[in-house]
C-alpha cells in the first residue's frame, strides 16, 4: 500500500537528516539580503528543530562543530590555537582539495582584498540552486491542487518553506559565523597559518594587510548567543510539530509531497557538502599565482622555503610539524 500512497512513511521521513540541514544552513547563512539563506524545506527540518532548540537553551550555538581538526598559528607570535570555527575549517578543507597536488607538504599563500568586505559571502551556484529548488517545490505542490482540488500539499509546502527560511534567517547565524574583529585599516597586518598539523600535507597562509577580519578571533569560536534565538527556536519547534500533524492527516496525493521533500533533501545534501570558493565562504583573496604555492620534496625543506618567502611563517609552524628534537644541521639553520 505504501507504493500506492506513501502517506504512512512521510511522518517517518520528517524525523531524519537533521545534521544535514544544520550544515546546509551553515553553508548558506549570511549569503543573501536580510539574512535570507535559501535552504529548501525537506524531511530533516523537524529533527533539526529539536536539536536546534537543545543547543539554543544549552551552549547557545547554532553552527555545527568543525568537520576536521585544524590549528591556527600566528606567524608573528608563534601562538597555536585549536580552531573552533566551522567556516574556517571549510575554508581549509576546500582549498586543500583545490590546491594540493601531491608531495610532502604544500603551503599556499593568500592575500586579502580591500575591494570586498570580509564576512559577506558571494552568491555562487549553491546559493542560486537553493532558490531554484524552492520555486520548483512550490510548482510541484501546485499540481494536485490544480488537478483535483487538493491544496493540502501546497499548504504543507508553503508552511514548511516559511519555517525553513525563518529558521535559517535567524540573525545569530551570521553573527556567529563571522564573530571576529576587523584588521586595523591603518597599520594592521596579520599573518596566520591554517593547517591540520603534524602528518598533514597542506597548509594555507593568509596575509591580511590592513583589510579583512582577524582569523585568530574567528578560530576562537566566540559566543554570540541571543535570548531571541532560544525563544524563536522553541516557537519553530512547536510549529514543526504542528506541520508534522498536518502531514499525518494527508490523504491522497502523498507522492507529490514526497517529491517536494525529496527534492529539498537533495538540495540540503548538496549544499551541506559542496566545495565552495573562498568568496562564497566570505573570505576574499587576491588571485593566486604559481609563486604563491610552495612545495618541496621534504617537509623541512618546504618550511625553510616558506620562511624565506615570509619571515616567521616557517618558524611558527616548525613545532607543529616537528615536535621532537631536530637534527644538528636543521637546528643550526633555524638558530
Image (spheres, grey):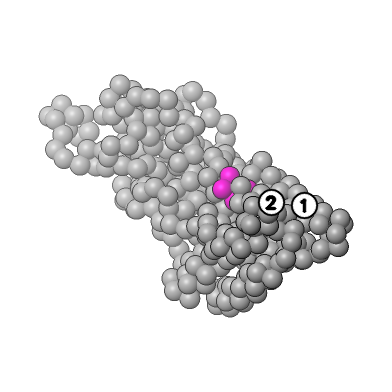
Q: Which mark is residue 140?
A: 1
Q: Which residue appears at 52% of the width and 25% of the height?
A: 289
How many marks can you see? 2
Circle nearer the N terminus (1, 2): 1
**Rendering quarter of residue 301:** top left
Would you place residue 244 above or below residue 269 in this image? Answer: below
Provide the residue span drawn in magenta. Answer: 267-271
Residue 210, position in %: x, y? 53, 47
What is the quadrant of the N terminus in the image? bottom right
The residue at the far front in this view is: 1
Would you place residue 70 above or below residue 7 in this image? Answer: above
- Relative side of 86 to 259, left or right: left
Q: Is residue 294 magenta?
A: no
**Rendering quarter of residue 298:** top left
Residue 174 in view of the camera:
no
Residue 218, position in %: x, y? 46, 55
Q: Are marks 1 and 2 in contact (CB under 8 Å)?
A: yes
Q: Which residue appears at 39% of the width and 47% of the height?
A: 68
Residue under pointer 2:
259
Residue 274, position in %: x, y? 55, 42
Residue 110 in view of the camera:
yes
Neighbourhood count class around disc 2 (C-alpha, 10 Å): few under 14, some 14–19, many 20 upward: some
Q: Which residue appears at 53% of the width and 54% of the height?
A: 20
Amino acid at each position: 500500500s505504501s507504493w500506492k500512497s506513501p502517506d504512512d512513511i512521510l511522518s517517518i521521513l520528517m524525523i531524519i537528516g537533521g545534521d544535514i540541514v544544520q550544515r546546509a544552513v551553515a553553508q548558506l547563512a549570511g549569503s543573501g539580503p536580510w539574512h535570507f539563506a535559501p535552504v529548501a524545506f525537506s524531511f530533516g527540518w523537524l529533527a533539526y528543530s529539536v536539536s536546534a532548540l537543545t543547543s539554543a537553551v544549552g551552549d547557545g550555538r547554532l553552527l555545527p562543530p568543525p568537520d576536521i581538526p585544524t590549528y591556527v598559528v600566528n606567524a608573528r607570535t608563534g601562538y597555536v590555537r585549536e580552531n573552533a570555527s566551522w567556516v574556517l575549517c571549510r575554508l581549509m578543507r576546500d582549498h586543500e582539495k583545490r590546491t594540493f597536488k601531491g608531495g610532502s607538504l604544500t603551503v599556499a599563500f593568500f592575500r586579502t582584498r580591500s575591494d570586498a568586505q570580509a564576512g559577506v559571502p558571494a552568491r555562487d551556484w549553491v546559493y542560486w540552486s537553493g532558490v531554484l529548488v524552492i520555486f520548483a517545490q512550490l510548482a510541484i505542490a501546485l499540481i494536485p491542487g490544480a488537478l483535483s482540488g487538493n491544496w493540502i500539499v501546497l499548504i504543507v509546502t508553503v508552511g514548511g518553506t516559511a519555517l525553513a527560511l525563518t529558521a535559517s534567517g535567524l540573525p545569530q547565524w551570521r553573527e556567529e559565523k563571522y564573530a571576529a574583529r576587523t584588521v586595523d585599516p591603518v597599520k594592521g597586518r596579520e599573518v596566520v597559518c591554517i593547517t591540520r598539523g603534524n602528518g598533514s600535507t597542506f597548509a594555507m597562509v593568509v596575509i591580511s594587510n590592513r583589510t579583512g577580519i582577524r582569523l585568530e578571533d574567528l578560530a576562537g569560536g566566540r559566543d554570540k548567543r541571543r535570548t531571541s534565538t532560544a525563544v524563536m527556536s522553541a516557537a519553530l519547534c512547536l510549529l514543526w510539530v504542528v506541520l508534522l500533524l498536518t502531514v499525518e492527516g494527508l490523504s491522497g496525493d502523498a507522492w507529490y509531497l514526497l517529491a517536494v521533500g525529496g527534492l529539498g533533501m537533495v538540495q540540503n545534501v548538496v549544499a551541506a557538502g559542496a566545495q565552495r570558493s573562498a568568496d562564497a565562504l566570505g573570505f576574499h583573496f587576491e588571485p593566486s599565482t604559481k609563486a604563491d604555492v610552495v612545495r618541496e620534496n621534504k617537509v623541512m625543506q618546504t618550511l625553510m622555503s616558506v620562511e624565506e618567502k615570509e619571515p616567521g611563517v616557517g618558524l611558527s609552524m616548525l613545532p607543529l610539524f616537528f615536535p621532537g628534537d631536530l637534527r644538528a644541521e636543521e637546528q643550526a639553520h633555524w638558530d
